[in-house]
Image: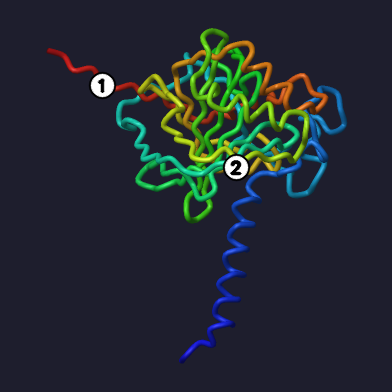
Amino acid sequence: MKLNKPIFLSSFLIIFLLNSMLVASQEVENEEEYFNYIEGSDKGPDHWGQIHKDWAACGNGDMQSPIDLLNEKVEVVHHLGRLKRRYKPSNASLVNRGHDIMLKWEYGAGSLFVNGMEYVLRQCHWHSPSEHTVDGQRYNLEVHMVHESLDKKIAVVGIMYKIGRRDKFLTELMDYVRAISNSKDAEKVVGLVNPKHIKLGSRKYYRYMGSLTTPPCTEGVTWTIIKKVRTVSREQVRLFREAVRDDSQMNARPTQDTNNRTVHLYSPRRIHT
């Protein structure tokens, strides 16, 4: 059957827009209008699950993130292998979402492969202080690199930072962050951004199943947390925290109960000679 060209193009456009909406719906964009990080607030983390029926997992989920990576309960494994990343430079924009600063790649910026599945890098954003902790210790900053598969599954790579030398990747972005500082929903085109400039610094990483750390707190997220804690300057942390001006002193969700989940620590197998 021969398709009418205008109808075909209209149908394609509708499908494309619906798909784009699904991608965007993984996280709430204007979060601070609905919730915040202020302890004791009726919109604070303890109440997220009560604010909207679609956010129920924030209150009653049993695979929530972030968690404390308690080393004495971590299972060291060798079979997971090195992270398989095929990132590439892509056009990106910085967005002030009112609760954080997000760098989004227009058409994705390459892929991460987990258990044979391909996840496209869509965006990254920053939390201060870190959301994950190690043996109860919270660090100064954490970046989340958010990836999505064709069937809408999410995989996030997290990297934590402590105060020290400047981070080179953040240095590349600082002028753009200043340009959108204090302006919720402000967006600034950055141009080509290479995610390979986000350094890991270690082959070792934690792996566990969890959730988004913001509403709707969707579970089934594959988390990879790099073991090495990198460094960032006080100025860089201050800039990313003050740029959002959301009345919160932090934008980090409290750690959640592990509920006996398995947390693996991948460590390359030593070769004995």
Between 5 and 55, the one lying in front of the other is 5
Helix, strand or loop at label 1? It is loop
Helix, strand or loop at label 2? It is strand
Q: Position of residue 66 (x, y in %)?
A: 61, 28
**What label sits on residue 238 in the rendered view?**
none
Which residue is denoted by mark 2 in the rendering?
A: 219
Where on the picture, by quarter, is residue 74? top left
Where on the picture, by quarter, is residue 9? bottom right
Mark 1 in CB contact with mark 2 (< 8 angstroms): no
Q: Position of residue 191 (x, y in %)?
A: 53, 40
Report crowding for label 2: few under 14, some 14 to 19, many 20 or more residues within 10 A (C-alpha): many
Which amino acid does the dot numbered 1 rest on? Arg
User: Going 59% across and 37% down the picture, which residue do you hit?
Assistant: 103
Question: Seen in the image, is 51 located left or right of residue 63?
Answer: right
Between 166 and 257, the one lying in front of the other is 166
Report crowding for label 1: few under 14, some 14 to 19, many 20 or more residues within 10 A (C-alpha): few
Which residue is denoted by mark 1 in the rendering?
A: 269
> Residue extending furthest bottom?
1
Question: Seen in the image, is 240 located left or right of residue 265?
Answer: right
Q: Position of residue 204 (x, y in %)?
A: 38, 22
Q: Quadrant of the C terminus?
A: top left
Q: Is residue 64 above or below residue 5?
A: above
The earlier-in-sequence mark between 1 and 2 is 2
Between 214 and 57, the one lying in front of the other is 214
Q: CA distance from mark 1 to mark 2?
A: 31 Å
User: Going 46% across and 46% down the picture, which residue do you hit?
Assistant: 120
Q: Position of residue 227 (x, y in %)?
A: 45, 19
User: Going 51% across and 13% down the picture, which residue do you hit?
Assistant: 231
Instruction: Tell how many labels.
Output: 2
User: Going 59% across and 82% down the picture, which residue do you hit?
Assistant: 7
Which amino acid does the dot numbered 2 rest on? Glu
> Residue extending furthest top?
164
